[in-house]
Amino acid sequence: MKRLFYITFLFMSLNMAAQVTITQATGWKECAYVKWEPLEGVDFYRVYYTCGALTDQIIDTQLIRSYGSYFRADVLGLAPGTYTMKVVPVTAGVEGTPAVSSSVTVTAHDRNGFAHEGGKVPGAYNLDGTLKTNAVVLYITQNTKNTCSMTVTGATANPCVGLQTILDGFKKGNDLRPLAVRLIGNITDLSNMLNGDIVIENKNTAGSSITFEGVGSDAYCNGWGVRVKSASNIEIRNLGFMLTNAAEGDNIGLQQDNDHVWIHNNDMFYGAAGGDADQAKGDGALDCKRSTYVTMSYNHFWDSGKCNLLGLSEATTTDLYVTYHHNWYDHSDSRHPRVRYYSAHIYNNYFDGNSKYGSGSTLGSSLFVEGNYFRNCKYPMLTSQQGTDIYNSPEGTFSGEDGGTIKAFNNSMSGQTRFVAYDAVNFPVQFDAYVATTRNETIPSSITSRLGGNSYNNFDTNPALYVNSLVVEDPTTARDNVIAYSGRVGAGDLTWTFNNGADDTSSAVNTGLAAALAGYTSSLVYIQGEAVVIPNTQTLNVPNNNDQIVLSGPMADMVFTWGGSATDATVNGLPASGIDYVKDTVAKTITVSGTPTADVSFTVTTSGPTGTPVTGSGTITTNNIPTGDEIHNFTLQTLNSSFYTFTSCNMNSTPGSATYDGLTLTARLKMETATSITYTTPAISTLTLVCDPTFNGPIKLDNVNYTTSGGIVVIPSVPAGAHTISKGSTTNLYYIKTEYTLGLGENPNQQKLVLYPNPVTNTLNIAASDSEVIQEIAVYNIIGQQVKNVKGDIRLIDMSDLRNGTYLVKVQTDHGIFNGKIVKN
C-alpha cells in the first residue's frame, strides 16, 4: 500500500512539475486566444489572463476546448490593451506549473455606424468591450442546445429549458440583465425553432440588450438561421452560417420593428437551395426589413447569391437608417445592398469579383456610397429604370420599381462593364449615380430619378448624424482592413480560394465550395466540463425541394449531399417511373432527376466506418392536369368539336355581334329547351360562357342556374367529370372556354413558390420570394370541392383538420397564380 501511494504521489508530482507548451497566442478584436499541446495524465486546465493591474483573471471552463492534438482557449470581453495568458494543468485538484504566453495586443471593434446612434450600446458588452454590469452568459453547444437552463424574469414558466425557450423568456422584455449567448462548435438544428430559425426578441425594451455570438474560429449555425423581430439593442457576431434551411430563407433576417442592431464579423456561406431559380445558393444572406439604426460591418460573404436586401413594404423614407461598412463581398452576385426607401451609408466595403451588380437604389431610397474598393464588379451601382439598369434590357433589374438616388464619392473602380455618372449635359437622366466632387456636397432636389421623380435627401450632410463628421479610409486601406478583419476570429476555420478568372463573372454555384460546406466536419473533440463529443458523425443534407411538387414535364433536380464520416450513400426505390439518379463520389452528391410518369418515393441512406447512418427521403408527385384550354368559338367552328358534344342544337340563322378576349363573335347557338352541350374534364376547371351582350339572365351548368352579366358568366372550380350546359333563359351562345385553373400555363413564374413538407401532417409551409405577396390560398379535394380558403399574405396553413388524401392548392400572388398538389398524411 505504501508503495502504491508512493507511485501515485510520484506521478502527481511529475504532472505538477510538467509545464504545457504554448504553441500560439494571438490578440484580436476585444478577445484573445491561446493554443497549447496536451499533457498526459492531466485532469483539466485553468486559463488566466493579465493586463496591467488586472491580474490572473480566470476564464470560464467552457471556453477551453480540445482539438485532439492541441487545446485552445478563447478569452472574450477584453478591453483594448496588452495581455498575457497563463495555462495551468490541474491534476487531482492541484494546479501544476503554469505556462505564460508572450504578450498579445487586443484592439477595439469599429463601432461606427447607425446602430450606435444616440449613444446606444447594442449587445451585452460595454463600449470598451467588457461585459456590462449584471450581464449573464449562456453557453450553447451541440450537447446542451436543447437542455440548457436559465431562470428568466417574467417568463411563462421557470426555469426555461432550451435556447429558444430561454430567448422566449427575454421576449417579454421584463428581464433587463444583459444577455450574452455564446455558441461553441458546429451546432445543427435545435428541437425547438420557429420555422427553422432561432428568433431573438425583447419587445423593443430600451433597457434590454442581447449579444448572440460564436466562440473562437469555428462556431456555426449549421442548417438554421437567426431572425430578429421587435427587438432593440441586439448584437450578432463571430458566427458562421451554412446550409440555412429555414422557411424565411435568410442566414440572418431583421424581420420587423427592430432598432439599434449591430451585426458584424460573421461568415456567410451558402444556404440550402430553394425552389426558385435564383435560390441555388440559398435565399438571402443578411436581409433587413422594417428596421432602423442598424449597422452591418466586417461580414464576409462567400459567393452569396443575394447578400443584402434592405426594405420591402415600409412605404416611407423617413427615419430609416442603415450602415454597411467593411464587408467583404467575396465573389457574391448581387444586392450589396439592394435598397427600397432607406437612407443607406455604404462605405469602405470590398466589392470583389461580383457577377451581377454592386449597390442598387429603388423606391426613393438615398444611398451614400463612398470609399469602397470595386474590383471586377460588373455594374458597381444601379438606379432602377435608368442608366445601366435599362441599358441592355428595358425590364431592368428591380421589378420595374421607381428609382432612388445614389451619391458616390471617392470610390476605386476597376474592371466594371459599365458605370455612368450624372452629367448635366450628356447624362442628365440616364445615369447610375451622382459622383460628388467633395464629400459634403449636397445634391440639388432638381436632380431626380427617371421613374418616380425621387430626389436625394442629403442625409449624409445632416450634422446630427454621424455620417457628416466621419473620417473614412481611402479605398485601398479599406480593402486591406476588410481582408484582415472581416469574418470570424482569425478568418475562421473554413477557407476557400476563388479562381478570379472563372468566378468573377459566374453566378453559378461553386461546386468545390458547396462540397466543402456539405462535407464540413468540426475538428472539435470536446469542451472542457462536458462529456467527450464523438466526432465525424455521418451527415446527409436533404434538399429544400425534397417531396417536390412536379406539375408536368421534367422535375427540378433534387441533390442529396453526404458528409461527416459518411463515405458513401445508397438509393432505394430508384430508378422508377422515369426517375433516376447520378452519384458523384467526389462531390459526395446524389442527384435525382427525370420526367415522372407516376408518383415516386425513394430513400437515400449514408454509410461509413464510424458514426450512425442517416436516411433522407424524397417524394415526387405527378399531376397530369392538362396544360391547354378547351375553346369553342361558334364563329369559327359552328358545331364541330372533339371536346364538346352538341345534342338537339340549332344555330341562329341571324348573325349577332359580341366581343370577348379581343375576338369579334358573330355566329351563335340558340339556347332552347332541348339544347344540350356535354363535355368531360379530367381535372378542376373554370367554365366561361359568352352569350348575347344584352343578356343578364341565367344559363345552366349541371342543371344549376348561373347568372350572366353583360352576356358573360365565369363559373370557377368546376369539378372533374362529366358536365352539361343547358338553357336557363332564352339566349344565344357565341363562345365556350374550359380553362384548367389548377394546371400549368396560367403564370410562367408559378414554380417560384414551394409547398413543403409534402406529404404534410399538420402545417403546410408556403415559401415565396421576398418580393412576392400572397393574396389568397385555396385548397381543393380531388373531386374539386374547396375545403379551405385563406386571404392575405399567409405562409403557414393548418392542414391538421383535413382527412388523409391528395389535395390541390391554388396560391394567388401579386405575381400570378401558383398551383400544386400535396398529400395529407
Image (cartoon, helix red, strand yellow):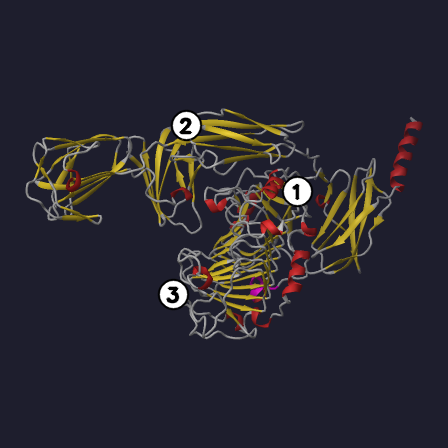
Q: CA distance from mark 1 to mark 3?
A: 49 Å
Write the residue at 57% across / 49% down: 303
Question: Which residue ends up furthest to the left in the rendered image?
Answer: 653
The C terminus, quarter of image: top left
- Mark 3 packing: few (<14 Cα in 10 Å), some, or many (20+)? some
Residue picked out by circle 1: 185
- Rendering quarter of residue 363: bottom left
Residue picked out by circle 2: 599
The N terminus, quarter of image: top right
Does residue 231 show up magenta in the picture?
no
Say what amino acid the circle numbered 2 marks. Answer: Asp
Write the residue at 61% across / 43% down: 513
**Residue 656, relative to residue 405: is it above or below?**
above
Residue 595 location, x and y as percent? 42, 31
Residue picked out by circle 3: 452
Disc 2 is placed on an element classified as loop
Q: Is residue 22 left or right of residue 74?
A: right
Q: Which mark is residue 392?
A: none
Say what amino acid the circle numbered 3 marks. Answer: Gly
The stretch in magenta equals 112-117
Residue 56 location, x and y as percent? 80, 53
Query: Which one is in front, 417 or 78?
Result: 417
